Amino acid sequence: AKFSTAKGFTPSLPGPGQGIAMDSYEIHLTLANNGAESLPLPVLEVTFTDDRGLIAIRRLVKPEEYAGQGSGTRLGAAKTLPVRFAFTLSGSHPASCTVRAVPQN
């Protein structure tokens, strides 16, 4: 059984005169369980890279952070789960974002 992700990466840039450069990024993705059995929800590894491909920031997002409390810890067979979360970053602007599902043991 495997998870797959489809994602959207939406930057929200600060307006002029807002002081320190803080950018908000909203990530939308859909987790899909393509297998025949239910699976534990994975940890999501979110990696922002700069224009040279170097990692600017990496964060692990636990299921309880993206699925909400009390929403269950498993994704049923042949089911999908829409996921949305946001990051606020300071400093340089990332050039890309990758989200990888890390299966739990």
Image (cartoon, rainbow, N blue to C red):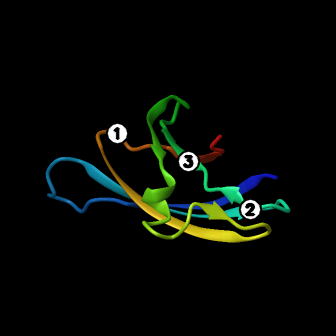
- Tell me the kind of residue under disc 2: Ser
Quadrant into which the C terminus falls: top right
| Mark 3 closeness class: few <14, some 14–19, many ≥20 residues within 10 Å | some
| Mark 2 closeness class: few <14, some 14–19, many ≥20 residues within 10 Å | some
Q: Position of residue 6 (x, y in %)?
A: 67, 61
The answer to whether the residues at label 2 and label 1 have Cβ atoms under 8 Å apart is no
- Tell me the kind of residue under disc 1: Ser
The answer to whether the residues at label 1 and label 3 have Cβ atoms under 8 Å apart is no
Q: How far apart are marks 1 and 3 (CA)?
A: 26 Å
- Tell me the kind of residue under disc 3: Val
Question: What residue occupies the far right of the structure in this picture?
Answer: 36
Mark 1 element type: loop
Name the residue tied to disc 3. 43
Mark 2 element type: loop
Drawn side of residue 16 relative to residue 63, left or right: left
Name the residue tied to disc 2. 38
Tag nearer the camera, 1 or 3 = 3
Q: How far apart are marks 2 and 3 (CA)?
A: 16 Å
Q: Can residue 97 be seen in this view?
A: no
Drawn side of residue 72 relative to residue 89, left or right: right
Q: How far apart are marks 2 and 1 (CA)?
A: 40 Å
Tag nearer the camera, 2 or 3 = 2
Residue at image coords 71%, 56%: 39
Is 105 rendered above or below residue 4?
Answer: above
Residue 84 tag number: none
Name the residue tied to disc 1. 92
Residue at image coords 29%, 39%: 91
- The residue closer to the viewer here, 46 or 60, is 60
- The residue closer to the viewer here, 37 or 44, is 37
Q: Position of residue 98 (x, y in %)?
A: 58, 46
